Image (cartoon, grey):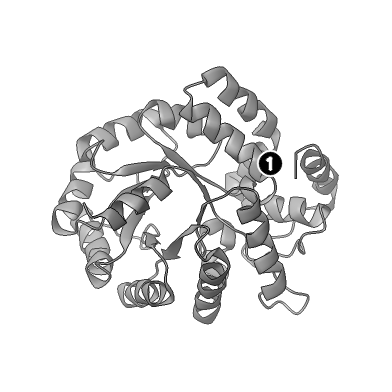
Amino acid sequence: MTTTFEAQRAALADVIAIPVTPFAEDGSVDRGAHRALLRRLLDGGIRTLTPCGNTGEFYALTPEERRLVTELTVAEAGERAAVLVGVGHEVPTAVGSARHARDRGAAMVMVHQPVHPYIADGGWVDYHRAVAEAVPELGVVPYIRNAQLPGVRLAELADHCPNVIGVKYAVPDAVRFAAFARDAGLERFTWVAGLAEPYAPSYFSAGATGFTSGLVNVAPAVSLDMLQALRSEDHPAAMKVWERIRRFEELRAANGSADNVAVVKEALASLGLCRRDVRPPSRTLPEEARAEVAAIAAGWPA
Protein backbone atom coordinates (compact mmCIF):
# COMPACT_ATOMS: atom_id res chain seq x y z
CA MET A 1 0.00 0.00 0.00
CA THR A 2 1.54 3.29 -1.06
CA THR A 3 1.58 6.44 1.04
CA THR A 4 -0.90 7.95 -1.40
CA PHE A 5 -3.35 5.12 -0.88
CA GLU A 6 -2.85 5.35 2.88
CA ALA A 7 -3.97 8.98 2.72
CA GLN A 8 -6.93 8.06 0.57
CA ARG A 9 -8.00 5.32 2.95
CA ALA A 10 -7.81 7.80 5.81
CA ALA A 11 -10.03 10.20 3.85
CA LEU A 12 -12.68 7.48 3.59
CA ALA A 13 -12.71 6.95 7.37
CA ASP A 14 -14.64 10.17 7.85
CA VAL A 15 -17.89 11.95 7.01
CA ILE A 16 -18.08 11.67 3.23
CA ALA A 17 -20.25 14.51 2.01
CA ILE A 18 -22.41 13.96 -1.06
CA PRO A 19 -23.05 17.55 -2.21
CA VAL A 20 -26.29 18.51 -3.89
CA THR A 21 -26.19 19.95 -7.40
CA PRO A 22 -28.07 23.26 -7.24
CA PHE A 23 -29.93 24.40 -10.33
CA ALA A 24 -30.52 27.95 -11.55
CA GLU A 25 -33.92 29.29 -12.60
CA ASP A 26 -33.23 28.30 -16.21
CA GLY A 27 -32.51 24.72 -15.16
CA SER A 28 -28.75 24.82 -15.63
CA VAL A 29 -26.22 24.01 -12.92
CA ASP A 30 -25.91 27.07 -10.67
CA ARG A 31 -22.14 27.38 -10.52
CA GLY A 32 -22.07 30.15 -7.94
CA ALA A 33 -24.46 28.40 -5.57
CA HIS A 34 -22.59 25.14 -6.06
CA ARG A 35 -19.25 26.61 -5.06
CA ALA A 36 -20.82 28.47 -2.13
CA LEU A 37 -22.33 25.23 -0.82
CA LEU A 38 -18.97 23.48 -1.18
CA ARG A 39 -17.23 26.29 0.74
CA ARG A 40 -19.84 25.97 3.47
CA LEU A 41 -19.04 22.27 3.80
CA LEU A 42 -15.30 22.92 3.87
CA ASP A 43 -15.62 25.76 6.36
CA GLY A 44 -17.77 23.45 8.48
CA GLY A 45 -14.95 20.93 8.78
CA ILE A 46 -15.78 18.44 6.03
CA ARG A 47 -12.68 16.90 4.45
CA THR A 48 -14.04 14.41 1.89
CA LEU A 49 -16.38 15.39 -0.96
CA THR A 50 -18.16 13.19 -3.51
CA PRO A 51 -19.35 15.07 -6.60
CA CYS A 52 -21.64 13.05 -8.87
CA GLY A 53 -23.21 11.06 -6.04
CA ASN A 54 -26.87 10.20 -5.76
CA THR A 55 -27.64 13.23 -3.58
CA GLY A 56 -26.03 15.21 -6.41
CA GLU A 57 -28.59 13.70 -8.85
CA PHE A 58 -25.90 11.81 -10.77
CA TYR A 59 -28.36 10.03 -13.05
CA ALA A 60 -30.18 13.28 -13.96
CA LEU A 61 -27.02 15.14 -15.03
CA THR A 62 -25.74 15.25 -18.59
CA PRO A 63 -22.18 14.07 -19.31
CA GLU A 64 -21.11 17.71 -19.63
CA GLU A 65 -22.71 18.57 -16.30
CA ARG A 66 -21.03 15.66 -14.57
CA ARG A 67 -17.68 16.92 -15.81
CA LEU A 68 -18.55 20.45 -14.70
CA VAL A 69 -19.56 19.35 -11.20
CA THR A 70 -16.32 17.38 -10.91
CA GLU A 71 -14.23 20.34 -12.00
CA LEU A 72 -16.01 22.80 -9.68
CA THR A 73 -15.54 20.47 -6.73
CA VAL A 74 -11.85 19.81 -7.35
CA ALA A 75 -11.22 23.52 -7.80
CA GLU A 76 -13.06 24.48 -4.63
CA ALA A 77 -11.57 21.68 -2.54
CA GLY A 78 -7.98 22.53 -3.39
CA GLU A 79 -5.78 21.16 -0.61
CA ARG A 80 -8.62 21.34 1.94
CA ALA A 81 -10.37 18.07 1.08
CA ALA A 82 -10.05 14.79 -0.78
CA VAL A 83 -12.35 14.44 -3.78
CA LEU A 84 -14.03 11.10 -4.51
CA VAL A 85 -15.79 11.40 -7.88
CA GLY A 86 -18.82 9.28 -8.68
CA VAL A 87 -18.58 7.46 -12.03
CA GLY A 88 -20.86 4.98 -13.72
CA HIS A 89 -23.13 4.09 -16.67
CA GLU A 90 -21.73 1.75 -19.34
CA VAL A 91 -18.06 0.79 -19.19
CA PRO A 92 -16.68 3.33 -21.73
CA THR A 93 -18.50 6.20 -20.01
CA ALA A 94 -17.39 5.07 -16.55
CA VAL A 95 -13.78 4.74 -17.72
CA GLY A 96 -13.89 8.12 -19.45
CA SER A 97 -15.31 9.76 -16.32
CA ALA A 98 -12.63 8.16 -14.16
CA ARG A 99 -9.88 9.42 -16.46
CA HIS A 100 -11.42 12.89 -16.45
CA ALA A 101 -11.46 12.84 -12.63
CA ARG A 102 -7.80 11.81 -12.60
CA ASP A 103 -6.81 14.48 -15.11
CA ARG A 104 -8.57 17.18 -13.08
CA GLY A 105 -6.79 16.19 -9.87
CA ALA A 106 -9.27 14.05 -7.96
CA ALA A 107 -7.86 11.53 -5.50
CA MET A 108 -10.41 8.74 -5.90
CA VAL A 109 -13.42 7.51 -7.81
CA MET A 110 -16.55 5.88 -6.48
CA VAL A 111 -18.04 3.40 -8.96
CA HIS A 112 -21.84 3.46 -8.85
CA GLN A 113 -23.67 0.15 -8.70
CA PRO A 114 -24.00 -0.95 -12.35
CA VAL A 115 -27.48 -0.26 -13.72
CA HIS A 116 -28.45 -3.34 -15.70
CA PRO A 117 -31.27 -5.91 -15.38
CA TYR A 118 -28.83 -8.82 -15.52
CA ILE A 119 -25.76 -8.59 -13.30
CA ALA A 120 -23.55 -11.65 -12.91
CA ASP A 121 -21.05 -11.81 -10.06
CA GLY A 122 -18.22 -12.27 -12.53
CA GLY A 123 -19.57 -9.46 -14.69
CA TRP A 124 -19.58 -7.18 -11.64
CA VAL A 125 -15.88 -7.95 -11.19
CA ASP A 126 -15.17 -7.30 -14.89
CA TYR A 127 -17.02 -3.96 -14.81
CA HIS A 128 -15.10 -2.64 -11.82
CA ARG A 129 -11.83 -4.08 -13.05
CA ALA A 130 -12.17 -2.13 -16.31
CA VAL A 131 -12.55 1.13 -14.37
CA ALA A 132 -9.84 0.40 -11.79
CA GLU A 133 -7.28 -0.68 -14.38
CA ALA A 134 -7.89 2.48 -16.40
CA VAL A 135 -6.85 4.70 -13.46
CA PRO A 136 -4.26 2.77 -11.41
CA GLU A 137 -3.13 6.04 -9.81
CA LEU A 138 -6.51 6.59 -8.16
CA GLY A 139 -8.12 4.89 -5.21
CA VAL A 140 -11.25 3.07 -6.33
CA VAL A 141 -14.34 2.60 -4.16
CA PRO A 142 -17.12 0.28 -5.34
CA TYR A 143 -20.61 1.41 -4.30
CA ILE A 144 -22.38 -1.82 -3.39
CA ARG A 145 -26.18 -1.98 -3.27
CA ASN A 146 -26.54 -5.61 -4.34
CA ALA A 147 -27.35 -7.88 -1.40
CA GLN A 148 -26.62 -10.97 -3.49
CA LEU A 149 -22.99 -10.10 -4.23
CA PRO A 150 -20.65 -12.30 -2.14
CA GLY A 151 -17.67 -10.80 -0.37
CA VAL A 152 -15.26 -13.13 -2.13
CA ARG A 153 -15.97 -11.29 -5.39
CA LEU A 154 -14.69 -8.06 -3.90
CA ALA A 155 -11.57 -9.87 -2.75
CA GLU A 156 -11.15 -11.23 -6.28
CA LEU A 157 -11.42 -7.71 -7.70
CA ALA A 158 -8.78 -6.39 -5.30
CA ASP A 159 -6.45 -9.27 -6.16
CA HIS A 160 -6.38 -7.87 -9.71
CA CYS A 161 -6.58 -4.19 -8.77
CA PRO A 162 -4.67 -3.08 -5.63
CA ASN A 163 -6.09 0.43 -6.05
CA VAL A 164 -9.49 -0.86 -4.87
CA ILE A 165 -9.02 0.46 -1.35
CA GLY A 166 -12.47 1.05 0.10
CA VAL A 167 -16.10 0.08 -0.15
CA LYS A 168 -19.29 2.11 0.13
CA TYR A 169 -21.70 -0.55 1.36
CA ALA A 170 -25.37 0.40 1.02
CA VAL A 171 -27.35 -2.77 1.65
CA PRO A 172 -29.79 -2.02 4.51
CA ASP A 173 -28.78 -5.03 6.57
CA ALA A 174 -26.08 -4.71 9.24
CA VAL A 175 -25.77 -8.48 9.60
CA ARG A 176 -25.23 -8.86 5.88
CA PHE A 177 -22.64 -6.07 5.98
CA ALA A 178 -20.74 -7.73 8.82
CA ALA A 179 -20.57 -11.03 6.93
CA PHE A 180 -19.68 -9.42 3.59
CA ALA A 181 -16.86 -7.37 5.11
CA ARG A 182 -15.33 -10.39 6.77
CA ASP A 183 -15.64 -12.55 3.68
CA ALA A 184 -13.95 -9.84 1.59
CA GLY A 185 -11.31 -8.94 4.19
CA LEU A 186 -12.20 -6.62 7.04
CA GLU A 187 -8.71 -5.09 7.32
CA ARG A 188 -8.09 -5.08 3.60
CA PHE A 189 -10.46 -2.20 2.81
CA THR A 190 -11.80 0.96 4.41
CA TRP A 191 -15.48 0.32 5.00
CA VAL A 192 -17.96 3.16 4.51
CA ALA A 193 -21.54 2.99 5.76
CA GLY A 194 -23.25 3.97 2.52
CA LEU A 195 -26.70 4.54 4.00
CA ALA A 196 -25.61 7.61 5.96
CA GLU A 197 -26.26 8.59 9.58
CA PRO A 198 -29.31 6.36 10.23
CA TYR A 199 -27.25 3.22 9.65
CA ALA A 200 -23.87 4.50 10.82
CA PRO A 201 -24.10 3.29 14.46
CA SER A 202 -24.94 -0.29 13.51
CA TYR A 203 -22.43 -0.39 10.65
CA PHE A 204 -19.63 1.04 12.78
CA SER A 205 -20.26 -1.72 15.32
CA ALA A 206 -19.57 -4.21 12.51
CA GLY A 207 -16.40 -2.57 11.15
CA ALA A 208 -17.22 0.61 9.23
CA THR A 209 -15.03 3.64 9.95
CA GLY A 210 -16.70 6.25 7.75
CA PHE A 211 -20.17 7.12 6.51
CA THR A 212 -21.68 9.04 3.62
CA SER A 213 -24.07 11.91 4.21
CA GLY A 214 -26.56 14.05 2.33
CA LEU A 215 -27.79 15.68 5.53
CA VAL A 216 -24.31 17.21 5.90
CA ASN A 217 -25.26 19.70 3.17
CA VAL A 218 -27.67 21.22 5.68
CA ALA A 219 -25.85 20.83 8.99
CA PRO A 220 -22.18 19.79 8.85
CA ALA A 221 -21.84 20.07 12.63
CA VAL A 222 -24.54 17.46 13.20
CA SER A 223 -22.82 14.90 10.97
CA LEU A 224 -19.46 15.61 12.61
CA ASP A 225 -21.05 15.14 16.05
CA MET A 226 -22.15 11.68 14.92
CA LEU A 227 -18.65 10.86 13.67
CA GLN A 228 -17.02 12.00 16.90
CA ALA A 229 -19.35 9.89 18.99
CA LEU A 230 -18.73 6.83 16.83
CA ARG A 231 -14.97 7.30 16.87
CA SER A 232 -15.11 7.58 20.66
CA GLU A 233 -17.25 4.43 20.82
CA ASP A 234 -19.82 6.48 22.70
CA HIS A 235 -22.95 4.71 21.54
CA PRO A 236 -25.38 6.72 23.70
CA ALA A 237 -24.01 9.97 22.27
CA ALA A 238 -24.27 8.61 18.72
CA MET A 239 -27.87 7.64 19.34
CA LYS A 240 -28.66 11.11 20.65
CA VAL A 241 -27.56 12.46 17.27
CA TRP A 242 -29.58 9.71 15.62
CA GLU A 243 -32.66 10.88 17.48
CA ARG A 244 -32.06 14.48 16.35
CA ILE A 245 -31.95 13.50 12.69
CA ARG A 246 -34.54 10.72 12.76
CA ARG A 247 -37.53 12.62 11.38
CA PHE A 248 -35.51 14.31 8.65
CA GLU A 249 -34.18 10.96 7.47
CA GLU A 250 -37.61 9.34 7.71
CA LEU A 251 -38.93 11.98 5.32
CA ARG A 252 -36.06 11.25 2.95
CA ALA A 253 -36.63 7.49 3.11
CA ALA A 254 -40.42 7.54 2.70
CA ASN A 255 -42.01 5.96 -0.36
CA GLY A 256 -38.85 4.20 -1.44
CA SER A 257 -36.74 7.34 -0.97
CA ALA A 258 -38.81 9.22 -3.55
CA ASP A 259 -38.05 12.57 -1.90
CA ASN A 260 -34.52 11.77 -0.76
CA VAL A 261 -32.88 14.69 -2.55
CA ALA A 262 -35.95 16.94 -2.47
CA VAL A 263 -35.94 17.00 1.34
CA VAL A 264 -32.29 18.07 1.43
CA LYS A 265 -32.82 20.78 -1.17
CA GLU A 266 -35.96 21.98 0.60
CA ALA A 267 -33.98 22.38 3.81
CA LEU A 268 -31.29 24.32 1.94
CA ALA A 269 -33.93 26.48 0.25
CA SER A 270 -35.47 27.27 3.64
CA LEU A 271 -32.06 28.55 4.74
CA GLY A 272 -31.68 30.65 1.60
CA LEU A 273 -28.76 28.62 0.28
CA CYS A 274 -30.09 27.33 -3.06
CA ARG A 275 -33.28 26.73 -5.01
CA ARG A 276 -35.42 23.71 -4.19
CA ASP A 277 -35.48 22.47 -7.80
CA VAL A 278 -34.78 18.81 -8.54
CA ARG A 279 -34.94 17.00 -11.87
CA PRO A 280 -37.25 14.19 -12.96
CA PRO A 281 -37.75 11.45 -12.02
CA SER A 282 -37.45 13.19 -8.63
CA ARG A 283 -39.94 15.93 -7.73
CA THR A 284 -39.91 19.01 -5.55
CA LEU A 285 -41.27 18.44 -2.07
CA PRO A 286 -45.04 18.83 -1.77
CA GLU A 287 -46.18 22.09 -0.20
CA GLU A 288 -47.64 20.39 2.86
CA ALA A 289 -44.25 18.92 3.84
CA ARG A 290 -42.13 22.03 3.39
CA ALA A 291 -42.85 23.70 6.72
CA GLU A 292 -41.83 20.58 8.66
CA VAL A 293 -38.51 20.35 6.83
CA ALA A 294 -37.85 24.06 7.36
CA ALA A 295 -38.53 23.71 11.09
CA ILE A 296 -36.11 20.83 11.40
CA ALA A 297 -33.37 22.70 9.53
CA ALA A 298 -33.90 25.82 11.63
CA GLY A 299 -33.29 23.80 14.78
CA TRP A 300 -29.84 22.60 13.73
CA PRO A 301 -26.57 24.53 14.00
CA ALA A 302 -25.42 26.19 10.77
Residue 7 drawn at (x, y percent): 35, 52
Q: Quadrant of residue 251?
A: top right
Q: Quadrant of the C terminus?
A: top right
Quadrant of the image occupied by residue 147: top left
Residue visible at 48% across and 25% down in the picture: 232
- The amino acid type, in three-letter code, at marker 1 is Leu
Q: Which residue is mark 1?
A: 251
- Does residue 227 appear in this view? yes
Left or right, 177 with respect to 15, comes to left
Q: Position of residue 50 (x, y in %)?
A: 50, 59
Q: Nearer the viewer, residue 76 or 283?
A: 76
Structural crowding at the residue carrying mark 1, measured as other residues with C-alpha within 10 Å and reported as few (<14), some (14–19) or many (≥20): some
Left or right position of 118 against 226: left
Closer to the camera, 255 or 219?
219
Near-viewer residue (18 or 108) = 108
Nearer the observer, 7 or 229: 7
